[in-house]
Amino acid sequence: MSSDPTFYFFPHKVLIITAIVESSLKITYAGNTLKLYIKYMVSIRCKMVVKAELDKLGLHYGTVDLGEVEVKENINAAQRDQLKIGLLRSGLELMDDKKAMLIEKIKNVIVEMVHYSDELPKVKNSDYIADKLAFDYTYLANLFSEATGITIEQFIIIHKIERVKELLLYDELTLTEISYKLNYSSVAHLSNQFKKITGLTPSYFKKLKRKRLTTLENV
């Protein structure tokens, strides 16, 4: 019996069947949709190429981001091979399932670290992630940037700023307390990074959101 991976879509989750050995199935859950990761997908033109190749195969898809595609139905080994060949013609590379799952694990570790921890770890982000996933950090960093087009550190910064926004709106901590909680070296460091990402200072962001909430309450 073939051990090629086959993908099955169900209403509530996607199952990736990675091996069939003596009628027993090794199943890994991958969320509500099947995510494919594509290397060298760095422009709008690349997104158009990917959509065209998916359309050729009659596959239905949702979000198509740089480096990442959500597919909403079954993909068998033959379809995957055809997609891989089609993408290669345009200089794009479909990543194998183990690497795709590892990228999801990297993202999950970062989201849990930033959004669901009382305080960020006091060790380096690189050491924390490498230890959690039991992989060399350089390998993880290269894999992540090739697939997503951004570095792990940039991904962390994006989520830290989202967390800052949440904490500002909760209005339970001062900016100094938030900077300490999220391992910023100073309030100035936090403020500079916040403005670089959002175009606003933390105080102006908070004031703006408060004004919008007040306006909505008065409607």
Image (cartoon, rainbow, N blue to C red):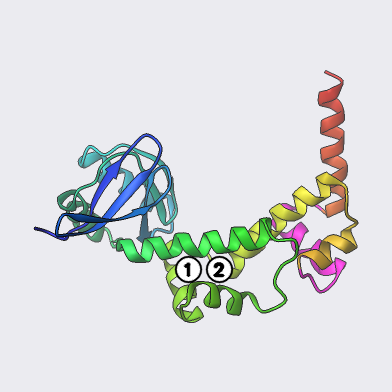
In the rendered structure, the answer to whether residue 108 lies left or right of residue 92 reads right
Q: Which structural element holds mark 2?
A: helix
Residue 163 sits in which quadrant?
Answer: bottom right
Q: Position of residue 206 (x, y in %)?
A: 85, 45
Relative height, residue 161 to residue 99 (above, below): above
Q: Residue furthest left?
A: 1
Examine the residues drawn in magenta and state their main secondary structure: helix
Whether 185 is among the magenta residues is yes
For the C terminus, the quadrant is top right
Q: CA distance from mark 1 to mark 2?
A: 7 Å
In the rendered structure, the answer to whether residue 25 lies left or right of residue 139 reads left
Q: Tell me the number on the disc at residue 145.
A: 1
Contact flag, marks 1 and 2 (Cβ < 8 Å): yes
The residue range painted magenta reads 183-200
Q: Residue furthest top?
A: 219
Q: Position of residue 92 (x, y in %)?
A: 31, 61
Amino acid identity at mark 2: Ile
In the rendered structure, the answer to whether residue 85 lies left or right of residue 189 reads left
Whether 58 is among the magenta residues is no
